[in-house]
Image (cartoon, rainbow, N blue to C red):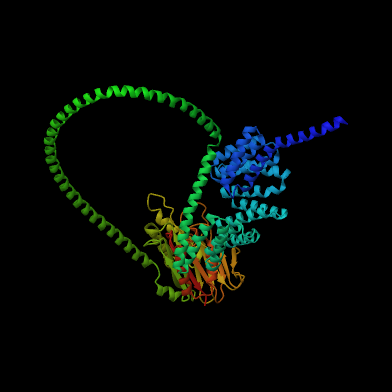
Amino acid sequence: MLKLFLSIPLLFISLICTAQGNSWKEEIDRKNNSAWNIVESKTVEAYQLSYNAKLESKNKNYTKGIAESNRNLGLIALLNGDYESALGLSLNSLQLFKDDSSKAVLQNQIGRIYTGLADFEKSAESLLQAIEINKRNNFRSLSGNYINYGNLKENVFQFDSATFYYNLAYELGKKNGDTLALLSALNNKGALAGILNQLEEERNNYNEAYLLAPKGSNQKSQIAGNLAINFFTTKDLKKAKEYSDIAHNLALINSFTAGMKEARLLQSKIAELKNNLADALLYFKDFQELSSRLLDESTLKKITQIQLTNDFGQQQKIDSLKKVAEIKAIEDENEKQELLRQEEIQQRNIIIYFVIAFLIGALLISRRLFIIGKERKAANKLISKQKVEVEEQRDFAKQQQKITEEQKVIVEEKNHEILESIHYAKRLQDAILPSKTAVKKALPNSFIYYQPKDIVAGDFYFVEEIAVNNSKKVFFAAADCTGHGVPGAMVSVVCANAMNRAVKEFKLTDVGHILDKVTDLVIEAFEKGEEMIKDGMDIALCSLDKATNTLYFAGANNPLWILSKNENLSTDSNNYKTVTTEDGLVFLHEIKATKQPIGQFDSRQNFVTHQVQLNKGDQVLLSSDGFPDQFGGVKGKKYMSLRFKKHLLSIAELACENQEANLIQEFTDWTAGHEQIDDVCVMGVKVQ
């Protein structure tokens, strides 16, 4: 019984010692876990926690603490863009961890780092290892792995593959009820759709993410900002303003400076477009202040990055400073004794130095007076010489100025002659184009939007009405020759001449045969010289039987578009596709051209003629690639063919002259602040 009573206190003492012995581990683990949870929102605080945890772990030789600290510090370096430090810390942590769950987290992190370093092969290897481990042990974490693997595919321009993995992450997040995974997947899908100019798909993804994001959260602010940009791009200024206000207010609540800055810039642009110049100025001033604040925050992050880079040398630096302090104390004492001895010697020598200095000073003054006199004579002689040189240089400068002015006159005369020649070339090019009167006579209900990039153009249009078998056919085309400016204009003259010869001289009426003949004539024209010239053109050529409204089409790379209220197209072509409006009332049918240009081509074949029976109210549209290839808008992207077709659908009900005015305004708005990159030629013909 006595032994039992004695053993109970000993047991309590043992338990207390054990608890005290493990308390420091719990404190280190707490710091590392706290840092991991706030690493992306409060990077500086996370760094301080992880760094302190690492120092304590090293002092205690606590392997798990070192591994978790290095993992955290590696992620912080990754977020700061210091990929080299991030890789070293993460690989060190991977070697220390033994469990599969931690290895999967590190492999995922290392994969992201290799993506940042553009080492995509190693990135794929690490991310696939993380995926394999989580498939066995942690199915819930796969969503994040799939998103990072999708980011990798996006970086190597494998957009279909990136979409596949984003969708996998989305479905997995949905199955697991993981809101964060769903938000991340939807944001990445939306961003990729924006890159591909799929604006409706981009908006759908962001809308779904917006509904899922926690109320008042930073994620909701960022998603609202993305939606605002989408609506701004599609010119829905009311919605763009609404969501930019939401983005700014949420960013303000969350002290998210970058979000406030982006929202203010967009609000300024919206106010400017609405002619609210006072509001635009206020928003822009706020944007500038936020930019300055963001620069200060970036400086703080940079300090963290520098501290992180020097992480491994901190303790050695502390030890070195202590040693230096001890050495300095000894040196200070020795220096004090030496100063006393030097003062005694100095007092003894002062008198000697004074006498010597006085004698030397007197000698130097005498010598200096002699030198000054000599220098003054030399200076007077030099001044006289320099005066002569200055006068000579002045005369030379006048001669050079006269030569420069003469050369300027010559250059201006040459530039004037060149410009005169180009303007004369424009008059020659205008002469090969049909006049507006001739176009309206042949095609009364039509428009041609023609806007060269330079004075002369590589694009041209062709209209010719000819009697064929007691009926009238109108031949019309929109052509895009190689290049633009003077070279493009020269090619256009050759190609336009070939078109006229094929129709008028060779009396060809089948549009496919016409393009075959034009190809022969263009090749023949360019083969006369010693050099091989592969220039030519892309063209969409039509002939319209005005009596029966029968249309014949052949194209070299450029397609034919038909606006119609009929869902089905009456044609012999089996190679057409259709786009419609949201209400399904108007349809745009596209008939593909033969995939070869007019000119030299290795695998040349005969051009195919397609027949289409048009109905009253149908409209035929032809275009070069200048409009859809133009860069512009808020993000400086291409207009793109799909957007162009949807815009043509939106103006289908307008009269031809109003359609032309609308296209001019749309192109002007899109190119605002951007240089026109190519000639533009769009042609529309409505059937009466």
Displayed quadrant of residue 650: bottom right
Total labels: the figure holds: 0
Relative image position of residue 15 (x, y in whole percent)? 76, 36
| Front residue of this view, candidates 353 and 676 | 353
Above or below residue 235? Residue 142 is above
Q: Residue furthest right?
A: 1
Is residue 681 visible to the viewer in this orientation of the structure? no
Q: In screen coordinates, is 591 left or right of 132?
A: left
Q: In screen coordinates, is 671 left or right of 185?
A: left
| Front residue of this view, candidates 322 and 630 | 322
Q: At x 69% / y 40%, what residue is drawn? A: 26
| Front residue of this view, candidates 341 and 534 | 341
| Front residue of this view, candidates 38 and 330 | 330
Relative image position of residue 569 (x, y in whole percent)? 60, 70
Name the image quarter holding the N terminus. Answer: top right
Q: At x 47% / y 74%, what residue is drawn? A: 658
Q: At x 56% / y 70%, what residue is drawn? A: 612
Is residue 534 visible to the viewer in this orientation of the structure? yes
Relative image position of residue 538 (x, y in whole percent)? 47, 60
Relative image position of residue 347 (x, y in whole percent)? 30, 24
